[in-house]
């Protein structure tokens, strides 16, 4: 009988490997490997998550291309210039008004044409000028102001007032007209070289109840090229420099 028991033990190679806890070998391995398997599975799941942009994600590049195309088609048809405007942006409370481009509309008023493109206008303004970009990062509201088309010099001389669209809202009717294609709006952005600064004016901040900037006495403007000898004849200490 003893010889028989020894023979059985020799024929069973795992007999001496049974853990003292009473768990079988398969169970013991599964208990030790369980956390590793679970961790591997979590990695596989996380790798499977693909980041995709929403189908309607805003693209400034595409929006700007559409706005420029519309401006160049629509503006020539606005013979009276009643639906076209110069567009300025300023940080709330700042005396600086940055010229950012020109806007026009067809089948819609000038203000509605600008407001329907508000995001394009403000995003471009931030790219155009560091001061506006910094103000936006500091959560200072950016405001849109307008003037009749082609009046940059008159604005700088304070012969032409600016009108605020800061509190204006695009009506549901105007929004529907633009989205349906019954009305069109276009924007021609101001563009400058990398080593240049954009055009801006520094103006008084007194505004009437209609949101029109009170220009006061018209300023006498002298146009001088950078580095010109004519600068020596100008009292720069009491002059307002417009770039």
Image (tube, rainbow, N blue to C red):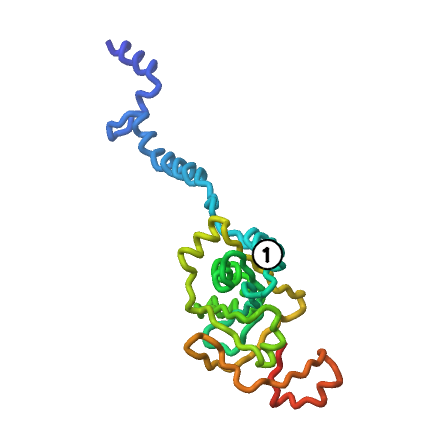
Q: Is residue 118 above or below residue 146?
A: above
In x, y percent, where is residue 229? 75, 85
Task: Please state the horizontal and vertical placement of residue 90, each as a whole percent of the image.
Answer: 51, 72
Residue depicted at 45% across the width and 39% down the height? 47
Quarter of the image containing the C terminus? bottom right
In this rendered view, identify the residue nearer to me: 205 or 142. Answer: 205
* In-front residue for pair 33/171: 171
Res. 173 image quadrant: bottom left
Q: Quadrant of residue 167?
A: bottom left
Q: Is residue 118 visible?
A: no
- Residue at mark 1: 74
**Residue pictured at 64% horizontal, 88% vertical:** 236
Residue 107 appears anywhere in the view: yes
Residue at 43% in and 75% down = 210
Relative placement, left or right, of 197 versus 90 is: right
For the N terminus, the quadrant is top left
Please tell me how crowded label 1 is: few (under 14), some (14-19), or many (20+) other residues with Cα within 10 Å.
Answer: many
Q: Residue 17 location, x and y as percent?
A: 32, 25
Say if 73 sits above or below 197 in the image: above
23 versus 3 height, above or below: below
Q: Residue at x 54, y 69 (%)?
A: 88
Residue 171 as seen in the image, left or right of residue 239: left
Relative to residue 231, is residue 41 drawn left or right? left
Q: Secondary structure at mark 1?
A: helix
């Amino acid at each position: 009988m003893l010889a028989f028991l020894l023979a059985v033990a020799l024929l069973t190679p795992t007999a001496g490997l049974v853990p003292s806890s009473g768990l079988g070998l398969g169970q013991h391995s599964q208990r030790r490997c369980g956390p590793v398997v679970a961790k591997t599975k979590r990695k596989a799941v996380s790798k499977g998550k693909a980041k995709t942009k929403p189908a309607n994600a805003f693209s400034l590049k595409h929006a700007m291309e559409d706005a420029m195309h519309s401006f160049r088609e629509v503006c020539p048809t606005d013979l009276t210039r009643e639906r076209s405007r110069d567009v300025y942006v300023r940080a709330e409370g700042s005396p600086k008004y940055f010229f950012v481009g020109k806007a026009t509309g067809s089948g819609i008023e000038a203000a509605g044409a600008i407001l329907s493109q508000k995001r394009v206008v403000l995003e471009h303004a931030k790219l155009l000028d560091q001061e506006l970009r910094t103000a936006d990062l500091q959560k200072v509201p950016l405001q849109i102001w307008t003037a009749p088309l082609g009046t940059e010099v008159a604005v700088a001389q304070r012969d032409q007032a600016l009108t605020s669209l800061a509190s204006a809202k695009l009506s549901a009717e105007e929004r529907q007209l633009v989205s349906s294609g019954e009305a069109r709006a276009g924007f021609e952005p101001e563009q400058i070289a990398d080593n240049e600064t954009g055009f801006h004016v520094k103006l008084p901040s007194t505004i009437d109840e209609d949101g029109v900037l009170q220009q006061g006495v018209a300023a006498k403007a002298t146009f001088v090229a950078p580095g010109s000898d004519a600068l020596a004849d100008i009292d720069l200490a009491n002059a307002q420099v417009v770039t």
